[in-house]
Amino acid sequence: MGNCQPTVFPYEDFDFMADIKAIRKACKGLGTDEKAIIEILANRSSEQRQIIKQAYFDKYDDLVDVLKSELSGSFENAILAMLDLPVIYAVKELRKAMKGAGTDEDVLVEILCTATNADIALFKECYFQVHERDLEADIEGDTSGDVRNLLMSLLQGTRDESYEVDEGLAEEDATSLFEAGEGCFGTDESTFSYILASRNYLQLQATFKIYEQLSGTEILDAIENETSGTLKKCYITLVRAAKNPQLYFARRLNDAMKGAGTDEDTLIRIIVCRSEYDLETIKDMYLEKYDVSLKDALRDECSGDFKRLLLAICH
């Protein structure tokens, strides 16, 4: 959607032999030279990091094992995330969200409700490669009710991704949404789910405008009043992704830093995974929305090498 700017680009003078020697030196002897590791990895694309990882393995050792033994905490987690392709990291996060007791539904919502059809297809394929499990079966087994129905329909990866707007359809959909929600006693979730999961983003924007004229209520306020729990989070994410995905991610980053404690996992997921796609645009949205730059927010919330790494990825 629109004009998305990354913060990380392929390094022009890429020399993987020089990089693996420098990383090896940074990890040898007493103490670790974290700055050298940050300097290299934050300035290479994920494809280049894959080459580094393979070359290090061929010449010395398993780089992931080496860094695991040298680093710790959120800094370690972020560095390891950078050594995976973004799609591989995403499917690891999906699995982590469903493993063990309880489900981290926020992670499922963030990843699946903002994905393109191509992302979904890749997630399914890579999830099986990495975990030897079926993503759809895991989601189906781990969620229930309307949330399950919605996520399962998103996993079909059949959203219209054209840029055409059919005004007549927008009016029909807006009326259906109104009649399914505010206009009736109780909420008909299947109508909301179908429209939000299948229409293209510009079509949805047109629908939300008409909905507002029709009902006098902003679509997000209607969802707030008519739904609850994880389903509400799904709908709000789908609406925000349709309106402005980069603003949605800026909000997620802000939520991760709000209040007591910091949700480092969310910071890692968004900053690392979006860095080669739209992180520069997310930074712009963050500043516009919160009147403080993302880098200043990270400076206040994070510390040590973890902070240095995130700031380096943000450039």
Image (cartoon, rainbow, N blue to C red):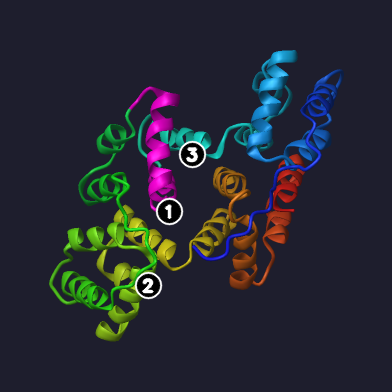
- Numbered label tally: 3
What element does badge 1 sit on?
A: loop
User: What segment is highlighted magenta in the picture?
Assistant: 105-133
Task: Please name the amino acid that badge 1 sits on.
Answer: Thr
Please check the rendered image and state whether residue 187 is part of the magenta-colored stretch, yes or no.
no
Residue 299 is left or right of residue 99, and the answer is right
Percent position of residue 23, x then y: 80, 26
Q: Is residue 278 visible?
A: yes
Q: Compared to 63, does 307 lie above or below? A: below
Q: Which mark is residue 1?
A: none
Cα–Cα span, label 2 and label 1:
15 Å
Q: Which mark is residue 114?
A: 1
Please check the rendered image and state whether residue 112 is part of the magenta-colored stretch, yes or no.
yes
> How many C-alpha atoms fall within 10 Å of the one at disc 2: few (<14), some, or many (≥20)?
some
Q: Which mark is first along the chain, 1 or 3?
A: 3
Q: Which residue is mark 2?
A: 205
